[in-house]
Amino acid sequence: MAAKPKLYYFNGRGRMESVRWLLAAAGVEFEEVLLETAEELQNLIKGGKLMYEQLPMVEIDGMMMVQTRAILRYIAGKYNLYGKDLKEQVLIDMYVEGMRDLYDIIMLSPLSLPEDKEKNFSFISEKATQRFFPVYEKALKDHGKNYLVGNQLSWADIHLLELILMVEECKSDALSAFPKLQEFKARVSKLPRIQKFLQPGSPRRPPMDEASLEAAKKIFKFEKGLLLKYSSTILAEF
Ligand SMILES: N[C@@H](CCC(=O)N[C@@H](CS)C(=O)NCC(=O)O)C(=O)O
C-alpha cells in the first residue's frame, strides 16, 4: 500500500489549507508534520527537503513537493479532478487562478493591523461580490450544469467552495445576490467526502486567530501590517 502523503506546515490554514481540502475531496488520508519552531524549519532546510526553503511541502509518491499550486495541480491530476483534456484543464486553471488571487488576500488578512481590519474586510467583500463571484455565477447559469467544468467535480469546484466559506467568514451574506452559487454551495457541501471534511474533528482548520498567528510567527518571519502593503500592490494592479 502506498504511503500516506505527509504534509509539512504549521498548525493553521495558510497555504496548506487548500491541499487539505483537495486531498479530503479525493478521499485520500494524509499525515501532518506540524512545525512549531524556526529551528524545525531550519532542520528541514538543512536536510535539503525544501527547494525554496519555504513551506508548504508535501511528501508524496517519493517526491518532496513544494509550491502550493504545483502541489494542488499534481493532486488534482492524480485523483481525476483536473478535467478530461487540455481545454478543460486550462478552464479549471483560469477559474482557480482567479480564486487564488482572492484567496491570497483573505489568507493574509490576519496579518492586518487592527485599524486596517475593517477596510480589508470591505476590500475582500467588494472584490468577491463584484469581480469573482459573478464569473462563477454566470458560468453555472450559462451551462446549467452542477459543476464549473465538464459537469464533473473538479479542483475548481472544491476550491470555489473553500473560497465561498472563507468570504462568508468576512461577510456572512456574501452570496445573497448569487442564487446559483447558493445552490452550488449546498450541493457540493453535501458530497459525502466534503460533508465529512466540514464536520468538527476533521483536518480542516479554523480561521486564523491571534494564537495561530503567534504559532506561525515562531516559525516564519512576518510583520504586522504586511497585508496593507501587499493589498496596495494588488489594488494598484486592479
Ligand atoms: N509560492 C510559494 C510561497 C511559499 C511561502 O511563502 N511560504 C511561507 C510560509 S506560508 C514561507 O515558507 N515563508 C518563509 C520564507 O519565505 O522564508 C507557495 O505557494 O508555496
Image: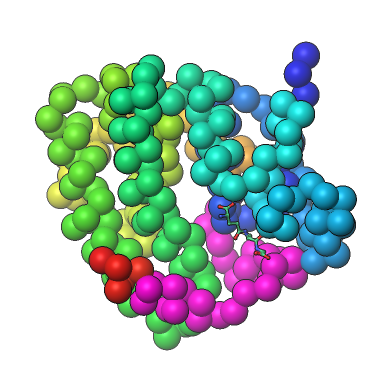
Q: From the image, which quarter does the N terminus lie in?
A: top right
Between 68 and 113, the one lying in front of the other is: 68
Answer with the quarter of the image where residue 39 lies.
bottom right
| 129 displayed left or right of 28 | left
User: In x, y percent, where is residue 161?
Assistant: 38, 40
Q: Is residue 168 visible?
A: yes
User: In x, y percent, where is residue 205?
Assistant: 58, 49
Q: Which residues are magenta?
A: 205-233
Answer with the quarter of the image where residue 138 lies.
top left
Between 92 and 151, the one lying in front of the other is: 92
User: In x, y percent, where is residue 186?
Assistant: 32, 33
| 191 displayed left or right of 17 | left
- 217 lies above or below 57: below
- 15 lies above or below 209: above
Figure quadrant, ligand 1: bottom right
Q: Residue at x 74, y 50 (%)?
A: 50
Q: Residue at x 68, y 73 (%)?
A: 221
- 182 lies above or below 228: above
User: In x, y percent, where is residue 233?
Assistant: 38, 73
Between 138 and 70, the one lying in front of the other is: 70
Q: Is residue 190 visible?
A: no
